[in-house]
Image (cartoon, rainbow, N blue to C red):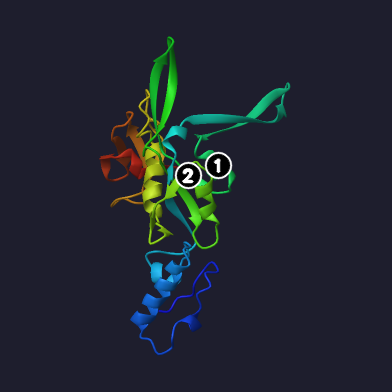
Amino acid sequence: MHGTLIGGSGVKDQDIGAQDSYVEAEEKRLALIRSKNRPVLAKADFCPASFPLGRVWCIAVLSPERMQWTVRRRLLGLVGNAEPVYDEHGCFNAERPVIEAGFETFAPCETRTKIRRGRKVIIRNPLFSSYIFIRMDREKDDWPTLLDSGDVEDILRVMGIPVRVPDQFIELLERAEQAGAYDYSAEKSPFSVGESVEIAEGPFTGIIAKIKSARPRQRVKLLLQALGTIDIDPCFLRKI
């Protein structure tokens, strides 16, 4: 399984002698890649079947001093009786340059309420301190330039290659956030009694059920046809 180097590393097959064994050739190939001092990806060396190419989720370390949540409003237009319509987008300050550079991000948040000057305010903090997830193509995207922004302190790497986070893990975090697992300000569950949901994981994957009862940050009671009632973690449910 001989790989082709990606990203213009300058390392070519003819740089490795034809008489070398496969192991020797691969060792030389890796040494040549590292000697270029660039995070170049070799398909065969770093990407077996369980480590696919293309757009994947990776982990970025952001500046902790810039992990404050902000919301920007953009006027989309006027409707009805000249009522303004806004597009609101919230993210952490250190995350915004990554978004503006064209990268998709995911930063799960923990939400709490605090009393400030006699008023209740919503506080959003990153679930994983100063870590966020970035979706990128490690071959084609110019991700090393993110390290020059001042907001991205590093990208988690092994041998210079960004480490891939399985899609299933990201999907689990997204479902948990949507289910209110990290929302300590919520007074009620995001699921309503009688609402239809799909079970996304476990032995009942793909089955449609109805919500029998739900409380914030607690297991949900589901009513399954012909099976009765079961309790399930809300992060295993998908709204439909």
Answer whether labels 1 and 2 touch (C-beta < 8 Å): yes
| 121 up-or-down from 193: above or below | above
Q: Tell me if mark 2 has few (under 14), some (14-19) or many (20+) residues whose alpha carbon lies within 10 angstroms of its own.
A: many
Residue in view at x 43 percent, y 86 percent:
17
> Foreground: 82 or 120?
120
Quadrant that contains the N terminus: bottom left
Residue that badge 2 annotates: 152
Which of label 1 and label 2 is nearer to you? 2
Residue in view at x 44 percent, y 23 percent:
122
Q: Amino acid at mark 2?
A: Val
Residue 42, can we see it? no
> Foreground: 193 or 77?
77
Give coordinates of residue 212: x percent, y percent.
32, 33
Q: Secondary structure at mark 1?
A: helix
Give coordinates of residue 23: x percent, y percent.
34, 80
Q: Tell me if mark 1 has few (under 14), some (14-19) or many (20+) residues whose alpha carbon lies within 10 angstroms of its own.
A: some
Question: Which mark is first along the chain, 2 or 1?
Answer: 1
Q: Quadrant of residue 45?
A: bottom left
Residue that badge 1 annotates: 97
Residue in view at x 44 percent, y 68 percent:
35
| 3 up-or-down from 183: above or below | below
Disc 1 versus disc 2: distance between alpha carbons? 9 Å
161 left or right of 82?
left
Give coordinates of residue 28: x percent, y percent.
40, 77
75 left or right of 139?
right
| 190 up-or-down from 151: above or below | above
Residue 225, can we see it? yes
